[in-house]
Each structure stands twice: as structure tokens, then as C-alpha cells.
Amino acid sequence: MEKIEQFYKKFEQAVELLQKDLAVSYLDAIIETGDNLAEGGELLIEDGKPSLKVRDQLAELYKQMVALSMTSEELRQVIQFALVKANQFDKIQANHQMTPDTIGFLVGYILEKFLTKNASYKILDITVGTGNLLSTVYQRMKVNGYKDIKLYGVDNDDTLLSIASMSARLQKIPAELFHQDAIDNLITPKVDVVVSDLPVGYYPVDKKVVNFKTHSDKGHSYVHHLLIEQALLQLVPGGYGLFLVPRGLFETKETQGLLRVIKNQAYFQGMLNLPEDLFLNKKNEKALLLLQKHGGEGNQVKQVLIGDFPPLKDKKEFAHFLKNIDDWAKENLD
């Protein structure tokens, strides 16, 4: 942890130097710092900026950071620390904030119950944002012996996509990222897995979603419903979707269209309410929805995985709940 703290302190200094010298947002300074480090510490110079004085300071900081020889996972953690600070500076809106590491760990933990280690997988995050969910899942799977993984990400926010791209390059993660609205026809290949921390709210362009079965008959449609439908279309037969959704996903008037899509296109394999202490506001609490697309080797599990994660602070109960998931997987997936 000491090495991470040393690296982060120098990373933070470099970001602040760039932010002031270039007169850019904290986020933009993070992106440029990460991109420079991904190039081995080479400075990007445009229109004489950064200034000569700042170039010398940055070159020394980059030299010291490169010498620390950080692992991919350590670099991922540094980026997350920096993005937390960026939120204080730039007041990032809720749908643009990164998915916490703990949630990424749980998504990866559940996903590994369905996937075998000797197969190749294409994994897509349909709303990739800063890329933290995708990279957390990837790092966990690599540590646990999955070797052939190709990553894809889609987002319509060019700043967030720049962060995700920088983060992937710095961690040397093989990710292809696409700048597009995920509601449009996706240009990624069909994939084995879709993971996504779905944005919650309404999609503003009604005429673009008239062909979606989850579109609302009156007014705007829920974007998280539309994205689940879109994700199912992008999965290969038998592929898996793991979605972070509002806890009350099936409690609204608009639920019927979503339920029909799930029934017609996928097996409902589970829904787990995430620990309440992960969320500052009760209305922001989320659950993990597990779907498997019809076809291929897909089939309905004997017992749907339903439950509530205990609080993170209750380590004994939390470990016991993870063991229950392991037991469920042995009984239903072997």
C-alpha cells in the first residue's frame, strides 16, 4: 500500500501542475497525465504548453513514477483515487461517477460462477463510463486463471471514454472502446457477457426507441429498461447479462414491457440486492440482475438466486453469504 501511496502522491502533483498550467478541468488533467505515463513518461506538447518550467517538473515526476514499477491492479487503484478527487473539483453528476471497486468485485465473483477458465470470452460494458467496472472484472478474472478475454466498451460521453481509454492503456488491458449512443445499433461484435452499471432515468429522444419493446406508450422511456433490451440483442445465444439496476426495478408501472422482454428472450437466473452500506442515499440502492439469453447452452436454473447481501461491515455474515452463493452454484450450475 505504501508504494501505491507514493505513486499517487506524485500522480496527484503531476495532475495539479497540468491543471494549472493548461487551465483545464481536473478530469482533463488526469487524462493527460495518464496518457503521458502510458507513453512511458513522454510529454504531449501542444502550442508550447506545458511551459518549460512545468515540463521539467513533470519529467522528473514521471521518471520517479515509472521507476516504481506499478502493477496493472495498483495503477487501476491510483486512477480511482484520482477520480474521487476529480469529483470534488469538477462535481461529476451521479450517472457519470465510477462504479465502486466492491461492486466490481461482486460482479466478477458472480460471473466466475457461470464461466469456465479454459474458454475464450468477449465481454462488453454497454455503458462503460470511466471503465472501472470492466477493468475490475478483468483484473479479477486474470488473477483467477482466465486467460483469453477480449473487452469492449461503449459510451456516448467522450470525456468518460477518454478516461476509460487512458486507464486501459495504462493498465495494458486489451479493450476496444466505441464512442456511440448505446441505444443505436451497436458496432461491437456479439459477445458472451454484458456487464453494466446502468444509468437510471429517462431516455430523451422518443422517436429513436419506437422499435424497442420496452419503450413507453406515453412520454419518455426508462433508459435502463432500453439498455437491458439492447444488451440482450448483443449477446450470443446462451450469453450472460449482469446488470446493476435500481432495487425497485420491477416495482414501477413501466415494468410490464421489461418483464415481457426478459420472459421472451432470457432466463431470469437471479437478483441480489447489494449491501445497503455501499450507498449514501437509500433511493440510490442497487441490485445485481442476472440474465442468460435463450439458446446455445442456456437453460433455466432449478433455483433462482435471490437474496440480500449483508452489510459489508459485518464480515462474518458477508463471508457466509458468499459461501451460500458458492453452494448455489454447485447445485445449479455444475
Image: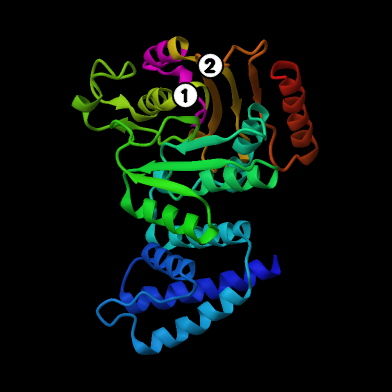
Is residue 93 on the magenta stretch?
no
Task: Give the quadrant of the N terminus.
Answer: bottom right
Quadrant holding the C terminus = top right
The quarter holding residue 48 reads bottom left
Give the residue type at disc 2: Gly
- What residue range appears in magenta? 241-262
Q: Quadrant of residue 212?
A: top left
Q: Report the side of 325 relative to 262 (left or right).
A: right
Number of numbered discs: 2
Which numbered circle lies on residue 253?
A: none
- Residue 162 drawn above or below residue 107: below
Q: Position of residue 245 (x, y in %)?
A: 48, 30
Judge left or right: residue 177 versus residue 63.
Answer: left
Q: Residue at x 44, y 72 (%)?
A: 15
Label 2, label 1: how far apart the Cα atoms are: 8 Å
- Residue 217, placed above or below residue 146: above
- Tell me the SS state at disc 2: loop
Q: Label for residue 236?
A: 1
| Among the 4 quarters of the image, the one containing residue 116 | top right
Residue type, numbered disc 1? Val
**CB-based contact (under 8 Å), mark 2 and mark 1:** yes
Q: Residues within 10 Å of mark 1 (few under 14, many from 20)?
A: some
Q: Give the x, y percent position of residue 88.
A: 45, 60
Q: Which residue is mark 2?
A: 296
Residue farthest toward the bottom in the current orientation of the protein = 53
User: 139 above or below 243?
Assistant: below
Q: Position of residue 89 (x, y in %)?
A: 41, 63
Between 147 and 155, the one nearer to me in the picture:
147
Task: Give the residue at x 37% y 13%.
Answer: 257
> Is disc 1 placed on a helix, strand or loop?
strand
The residue nearer to you, when weighing 98 against 250, is 98
